[in-house]
Image (tube, helix red, strand yellow):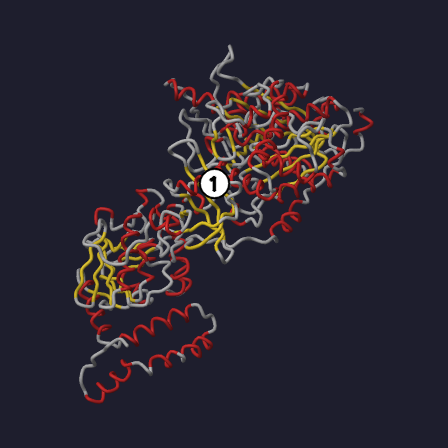
Amino acid sequence: MSDETTAGLDPNTPVVVGVGQASERITDPDYAALGEADLAARAVQAAFADTGAADRVAPVVDVVAAVRSFEKTSPASQSPFGRPDNMPRAVASRTGTDPRRAVEEVSGGQSPQHLVTEFGQEIADGRAHAVVLFGAEVMSTVRNAQRTGEQLDFAEKVGGPLEDRGFGLVGLTSIEEVKHGLVVPTPQYALLENARRHRLGCSREEYARQMGELFAPMTKVAAANPHAADPREHTADELIETSDANRMVAYPYPRRLIARDQVNQAAAVVLMSVRAATEAGIDPSRWVFLHGHADAVEQSLMDRPDLSRGPASTAAVHEALDMAGIGIDDVDAFDLYSCFPIAVSNITEEFGLAPDDPRGLTATGGLPYFGGPGNDYSMHGIAEIVDRVRRTPGSTGLVTANGGMMSKFSVGVYSAVPAPWRPSTSARLQQELDAGDTVPLCRFADGPATIETFTVLDPGRDSRTGLVIGRLADGSRFLSTVHRDDDALFDRLLTGEDPIGTAVWARSSAKGNMVASDEATMDRLRPRRPVGFRDDYSDVRVQRDGQILEITIDRPEARNAFRPKTNDELDEIFDAYFADPDLRVAILTGAGDKAFSAGNDLAGGLGGLTVPENGFGGLTSRRDLPKPVIAAVNGVALGGGLEVALSCHVIVADEKATFGLPEVKVGLVAAAGGLVRLPRVLPPALARDMILTGRKLDADEALRHGLVSRVAPAGGVLDLAREVARQILAASPTSIRESIAVMADSDAQPDTVEAVRDSISVLDRVLVSQDTTEGILAFLQKREPRWTGR
């Protein structure tokens, strides 16, 4: 590349001027058990050296950005041997740089390409001039040390400003997926893969062959790559035939078809403006330009209309190619993200690429063979593509970077041919994608259903787990597990010609949905809970007093907080109460004098994930409360405790009671009704204050603002609740029942006048009841009415 060729470029045009990789295998003779920072520093130093002007590049770097490692990729992640408190600056200090800005990117395999695009724009806008991007994983070293008992220490106090962008997991997981154990990529992709096989109409054998033939050529590339974690060439048969060394992990994936995470690998990219690269004396022959780029986000897994496709991924590739002004046939080298076969076939199917395309589908050797270093794999792909387009002047390389379940996708088109910077067009693309259809979700599935897709984890082991995404008759989608003892359904999933589309029976519980072969099998393996009261409960006390039922949350040592068992027992008790014709009023209170309930018992984890269909306390999501429930608040009613009280028809309080929604103080939200009900009960400004600050109300404030209807002297709230219950018993059961129904209906009616007009129809039922006749007659005869409830 001559100076004349680059003379017309804007001085702020971003160019890749250096790439570097570093790796070590436990079996290497010079294995040093490096930590992330040290291995990353080696990659950065290699990238500086690659510029041909390392001593002039390092001092002018003004931004260092790190791909988030797996040790920090989610709230559940951990660093067994510690880590630097500021990874970007830890690596900077090792490589002679002193950046003004340090960034740690969100989670996801799209990160490397997204960072190149983002900081390319930063350079083009003049907000940066020399940027180092890097990522590293030492999972192999960490696991080896844990296995052998070796003690490593990677902790490091670095300090300095850090722009930590957080996990960025929105859209990558959901409560439903966590509840059903769908929290790691392998089963998630297996669900998509089986949906694709069904769409194509392939037999199990045909589709397995396709997956093997897609990935076998990649192993040849990995075998020649000095940084590969598994540098061995495999045939398609070796990839798909199961054995002790290649066990089925999650159907249809044997181990050799999924990303290999036991790696020690790092990669780095140096981006500079044309002006900065020129001033540093970097030979223009080292410059590589980003001709096209795109970023796109797919719908959440359970929202996608077609689980066999990834339209956001393919749209991003089209967008990047269009920006570059080329077609797929003009690309000379590819590195397609290859964590699982469908991530590749989703692209090859769209663009007509064959598994044995002479250009190859990977420049590294692919994630199962080169290695899958967490979120940083595509940094290696970029490094390899940059090397290739440099070696072949005029050529073009394409990198695809994938995060989540084909959820976040970034694409780059690279060439050493000079090109101006082109701003992103991804916002318009994303608007088009976001306008797509979605599928309604059913969180609690019951009744006949069909299988939409499936997988079985560890199918050859006693610990096998079946996962099914199904559809109900109304078209809504649900996620479920398979009962471990339903051999017939497991046989259908693992050996049947195509289980997708076949009938199953679904049943819900607080722990999640389950499917069985048919209703009879479900009744045998997960029988319905009988409706009625038990003799005793673990977390609750129940006492009948004529037509009044007193329910006491009996966990005073935990301030009567709800754990899953508490919720299950209350749900069962309220089912029995509403079904018992001899009971007319229920009183709910807490044991002791300190707490009605402090809400979700966080000491036992996120119990909110295993709440029954009827919600916290069996009340907060219950659609029908046909008989009165009185909350006798005898102490604190916080979080879920207040939400349960808000679900009741009447709240009475001890004068020492307090009310609040402190969820925001522990990083949660009042999602069990507090966000909806509290602003309807209190003045909106006060409700917002409580929700957003965790502010508490005492009993007097609660009474003044209408949260409670009556306040009792200290220690007298249960007596007050009983008095309210007796007053309700003195009224017509029919009138009480119909009044409750009309109030519930009016809550869903936004137009007050229409609600009033609709409510008049209640008289059609009340005026013909025996209770109305008895009530009027008793009034005329000046006696107490004898209600029948009819």
Q: Quick one: label 1, few (<14), some, or many (20+) residues within 10 Å? A: many
Q: Is residue 96 found left or right of 619 in the rendered image?
A: right
Quadrant for residue 777, please give it: bottom left
Instruction: Determine the residue located farthest toward the right in the rendered image.
Output: 4
Residue identifier under label 1: 493
Q: Residue at x 53, y 42 (%)?
A: 498
- Which residue type does callout 1 highlight? Leu
Q: From this view, report whether residue 413 is shown above or below residue 783.
A: above
Where is residue 274 drawn, in percent x and y?
A: 72, 30
Q: Is residue 788 found left or right of 749 in the rendered image?
A: left
Where is residue 518 drawn, in percent x and y?
A: 41, 50
The quarter in which the C terminus is drawn is bottom left
Quadrant for residue 145, please give it: top left
Under circle 1, the secondary element is helix
Q: Is residue 719 found left or right of 351 in the rendered image?
A: left
82 and 607: which is toward the camera: 607
671 and 17: which is toward the camera: 671
744 and 390: which is toward the camera: 744
Where is residue 582 drawn, in percent x and y?
A: 22, 68
Q: From this view, report whether residue 553 is shown above or below residue 743.
A: above
447 and 320: which is toward the camera: 447
Q: Residue at x 39, y 55 (%)?
A: 691
For the image shown, how many numbered marks are present on the structure? 1
Q: From this view, report whether residue 548 is shown above or below residue 522.
A: below
Q: Residue at x 49, y 14 (%)?
A: 27
Q: Is residue 591 found left or right of 575 in the rendered image?
A: left
Where is residue 674 drawn, in percent x and y?
A: 38, 57
